[in-house]
Amino acid sequence: MREMIDGSIVIREEVQEDQARVFQLVKEAFIDEEYSDHKEQYLVERLRKSDGFIPELSLVAIFNSKIVGFVLLTKAAIKNEKRLHTTLVLAPVAVDKAFQNRGVGAALISFAHKKASLMGYGSIVIIGHKHYYPKFGYQKASKFGIHFPFEVPDENGFVIELKKDELLGIEGELVYPKEFFEA
Ligand SMILES: CC(C)(COP(=O)(O)OP(=O)(O)OC[C@H]1O[C@@H](n2cnc3c(N)ncnc32)[C@H](O)[C@@H]1OP(=O)(O)O)[C@@H](O)C(=O)NCCC(=O)NCCS
């Protein structure tokens, strides 16, 4: 039986001194993931410099004084003929391999949802594991008529409404911050 540690985790905003540890943690967390390009650590570095970067939504999870998890939510938009609708993109979430499956990822995602909601954001989009995100309330992005600027399997593109009916009538294409893509 795995021992959950979510009750002992402290989640706080990332500070500059955390960045080297976060780089290493993200790199190592994705190392065995088949779908990964193994460059997520560089994505984080680019997103920190982007216009969409929200310091309050760059979060680290601490257990016994050690950073064991990281999540980043960046400002993005859903674009249709009428308008640009602000949303957030969750990418990446990563947990130190030695601490996976013990509730750290769930604690980070739940905390990020609450904080984003308190800051007034209404929705979050994510590309991710088909079994992991529905338990947090994510639904298929396709159900809302939201698509991605590149091919994403239907079962991996998700969105969550933090405010009821936030995405009602907001169909369109997700517009990532340009830093999401390598130069
Ligand atoms: C995915 C990740 C963030 C989850 O964090 P975590 O702290 O290990 O997960 P939690 O303890 O909160 O939740 C455990 C659950 O997640 C599931 N899970 C963990 N890793 C998973 C994976 N790679 N694919 C699908 N499900 C996964 C477990 O099966 C478990 O499910 P259960 O609660 O139904 O038993 C973490 O495993 C990780 O860093 N993975 C490598 C990087 C990555 O893939 N990031 C996500 C990009 S979409």
Image (spheres, helix red, strand yellow):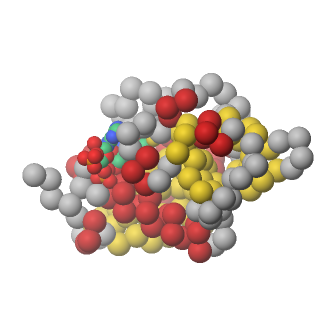
Vertical order, 30 against 55 (above or below): above
Q: Tell me what residue is drawn at x 44 percent, y 58 percent.
A: 109
Q: How many marks?
A: 0
> Where, by quadrant of the figure, is residue 20 drawn?
bottom left
List x then y, in percent, for residue 156.
Answer: 50, 34
List x then y, in percent, for residue 124.
Answer: 59, 53
- Which part of the image, by quadrant, shows the C terminus? top right
Question: Is residue 100 toward the left or the right of residue 76 in the image?
Answer: left
Is residue 42 visible in this depiction of the protein?
no
> Where, by quadrant of the figure, is residue 116 drawn?
bottom right
Is residue 159 visible in this depiction of the protein?
yes
Q: Tell me what residue is drawn at x 39 percent, y 26 percent.
A: 34
Tell which quarter ligand 1 is in.
top left
List x then y, in percent, for residue 82.
Answer: 89, 46
Q: Tell me what residue is drawn at x 43 percent, y 63 percent.
A: 110
Q: Single out the residue that lies furthest toward the left.
A: 1
Vertical order, 48 against 174 (above or below): below
> Where, by quadrant of the figure, is residue 152 drawn?
top right
Q: Tell me what residue is drawn at x 82 percent, y 50 percent.
A: 84
List x then y, in percent, for residue 25.
Answer: 38, 49
